Amino acid sequence: MSRNSDQNYGALWLLTPTVLLYVATFFVPLIMLGVLSFAKFEASVTTIGFYFDNYIKIFSDGITLKIFFQTVRLSIVITFWCLILGYPVALLMRKCSPKMKMILLFCVVSPLLTSIIVRNVAWLLILGRSGLINDTLIQWGLISRPLPLMYNEFGVILAVVHVYLSFMVLPLFGALNSINSSIEEAASSLGAPYWRVFLSITLPLSLPGVMAGCTLVFILSMGVYLTPVIMGGNFVLTLPMLITESVREQYDWPFASAMALMLLLAIGFMVILSSGVQRLVGRR
Amino acid sequence: MSSQEHYGSRLPYKFLVGLVALVIFFLEAPLIILIIQSFTAESYLAFPPPSYGIRWYKEVLTSEDWLNSITLSLTIAAVVTPLSLVLGTMAAFALDRGPKKLKHGLQTIMIAPMVLPHIVLGLGLFKMALQLDIDDSMLAYIPAHLTITIPFVIISVGASLQTFEQSLEEAARSLGANRFWAVWYITLPIIQPALIAGGIFSFIISFDEFIITFFLTTFQRTLPIEMFSTLMYQVKPSIAAVSTLTLAVTAFLTAMLILRGQVTSGDKVIK
Amino acid sequence: MSSVELKSIVKKYGAVTAVASIDLSVESGEFVTLLGPSGCGKTTTLRMVAGFIRPTSGTLSIGDIDMTGVPPHQRTVGLVFQNYALFPHMTVRKNVEFGLKMQKVLTSERGPRVQEALELVQLEALGERMPGELSGGQQQRVALARALVIRPDVLLLDEPFGALDKQLRDHMRVELRELQQKLKISTLFVTHDQDEALSMSDRIVVMSEGKVSQVGKPTEIYEKPQTRFVADFIGRSNILAGKVENKGKTINAEGLTLPNKENVIGGDEGVSVMIRPECVEITKSDSKATSSSADVKGKVTASIYLGSIVQYSVQINKGPNLVVTQNNTGSESLKNLAIGDDVDVSFPDSAIYILPG
């Protein structure tokens, strides 16, 4: 049935308020950041121009690049753990009873709607020096001095995984759900044991979901500010922390902008990589 | 169809359930511990609390700092939610009814703020706010929060519009309703679950938002920012009480969301 | 005054022509059907009358008022969809009332009019039900009531019975026709089902590929098709290629010699001869039968049992295959014609129809 295509373009005006908003809050600011990244910052004075100072500084000051790679490394580890822990949940959600599915869904979705601070506070109270774990272990006489569970990478990774696990589970669940279970049933009826069915059929077919989830968690982990600050203090430094410090304490906008752009580039690179992998896998 | 029939024996399924139970425990236990700890009558946090009471809830709800920050957060969220619903729904309609060729590209642009790390968004918004001299004010918070909530509304409403039967609107129009009234009387009531979901998401995202608001504020404090400052200063049970209060609101809204059936595997794949 | 008048209406989508210049009118109280295969442009035409599609060129009047650019909500048309399009979140009563609400009819007047409309379709008792609780037939009736209550200038129906089962469909056709005649409401009906068109219409407009093939009363369309397409589309037909011979006295139709009763000239291309299958009689060769036309012998090559009729393929004199249908009167001799049987074939001269062109 032919839709009234004459009026198709007319509907577009409904986008204007949002587009105008985005221009002011999103497009223009990003351009400003881009321009700023090429500005010079000397003695608290910012001169707009086309200087590579900031970028050079990033690569040569010894700290920034180190922290950048540390952030990337942490993000990869976090993504890995989210995948390991999240895949079983998505698997079960697909195969369980409707009632259990609702409960699981609630458990998986509620983190998305819970303040990150609250979640971090919860871990603070558990992992801290006088937190739950240390308190209990000392009380039971198992250790004499508190374990360093916080203010190190362990605490940061644990807490970030806790925050972003749901972002891995949902795309995974989506991908697993769209797999036609009759393929697995067919393999199973032909005599393949469950682990075989999983490895040869389920896992490969769920790869798009895996890629989507991993990309998402990676992007989020690269950009997270709060959790590393709360759980890592000054002992675990991330790029977002550098950016924030640069702006709020040193007022060095050009440098902060350059780092922000670097962050975006790293993320963009990851996205391209993952869609490239997806296409490769898809071709097989 | 029994789920066990997928596997040769029941063992793997039970193993899976056990594994998932551990993960869920990992996810939820810390929060439950937090909630319990918030009801301590002591002046320090311990699990289990030596004595119980609602002393810290009273303290939070009578403290000027906490109340101010709660009020600010609620106010921002209360303004952002309806605006976000209106703008997001309009955008979703534009995408659904507009030229099909442009849909994919336009949709990517409309969803883009969701994909960008908030730290970068916050940086840009702060710069913009400074330029216009509106930092540390509602004039900055509202547009900022709208930018991160509208994409969710677009996704939620957009998904609903895709499955919406357009002949219903045509029937309304043939009976004398112009395009607007047809949408008002027919389409909107039918896609109500999507609107509710979008509204709940917008509210919570705005209420819980930290980093962007952190950049934009100087003297004002939203609830997350107040919590952050308190944390950095000293860990008192009041933080547990505030957290529990926030959790209660969130849990309630999430339950509403799921019970209304709007959150299914199809609707909530965040990309 | 004609209720609907289309003059030179054309609809193009870029390079694709959906409707290529049609002229059409629906007189007051008339039931006109647009009949044709999918893609012929009938639905596009209907939607142009409703106002959802804007014609590329041409004029469209409803009730003698030019409505060419007017949006749907400003036209008083009653539209009935194939999928009923009942508002699922409103009761039956509220569904029917919707049009009155949009017309800003006084609240006090709405109740009685809704009641009246529901009575017309015999659904007065179901006013408080939700559409989801009704059967297909009931939903269709509500859709009808909803369209009629606003007292439209013309009733537009787009294959409304397509989703109903056969029994219900036949029943609804009769009901709709009776209702239409009682209310004397001008109606434009779209279908691809020729039985529907033949049984309900005052006039049929046969369409193909965006153009009108023929307009006429059902009897004209069926018995005197003007093109090969119409002859093929409506009912089953046998169409033979023929040549005028014998100084114009006979026509040689693929081996059959037929009298040239209409004295057609027929050029070099020859003529097309149509014989409706139900007009042909066949009897087994060894029983006595008289024929008024040429003594034609044939052999049964296929037989299909369709319940009330039996359809045979009969090869004539080792020449063309004729499709013959016989009413199933219960006579064993008729039903038991088997493949390979020799039969005598006969048909009256009046069954011979020569297609123009």
Image: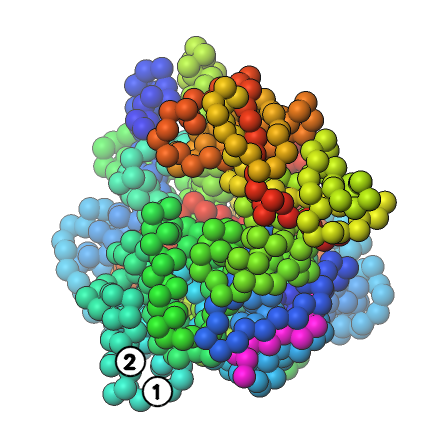
Residue C287 lies, with reference to residue B109, above or below; the image says above
**Pick the front one: A263 or C335:** C335
What is the chain identity of the residue bearing mark 2?
Answer: C
Residue C5 part of the magenta segment? yes
| Direction from residue A235 to residue B223 in the image, left or right | left
Task: Identify the residue position indicated by label 1 in the image.
Answer: C105
Segment colored magenta:
C1-11
Residue occupying the far top of the picture? A191
Q: A250 or C251, which lies in front?
A: C251
For image coordinates 63% across by 53% down, the residue present is C225
C-alpha gap between disc 2 and disc 1:
10 Å
Other residues around mark 1 within 10 Å, as few (<14) / some (14–19) / many (≥20): few
Q: Residue at x 40, y 60 (%)?
A: C84
Residue B229 forms part of the magenta stretch? no
Estimate the x, y position of residue A206 in percent, counting from the top left. Answer: 52, 32
For badge 1, the amino acid type reads Val
Reading the image, the residue beneath label 2 is C113
**Foreground of the two, B217 or A4:** A4
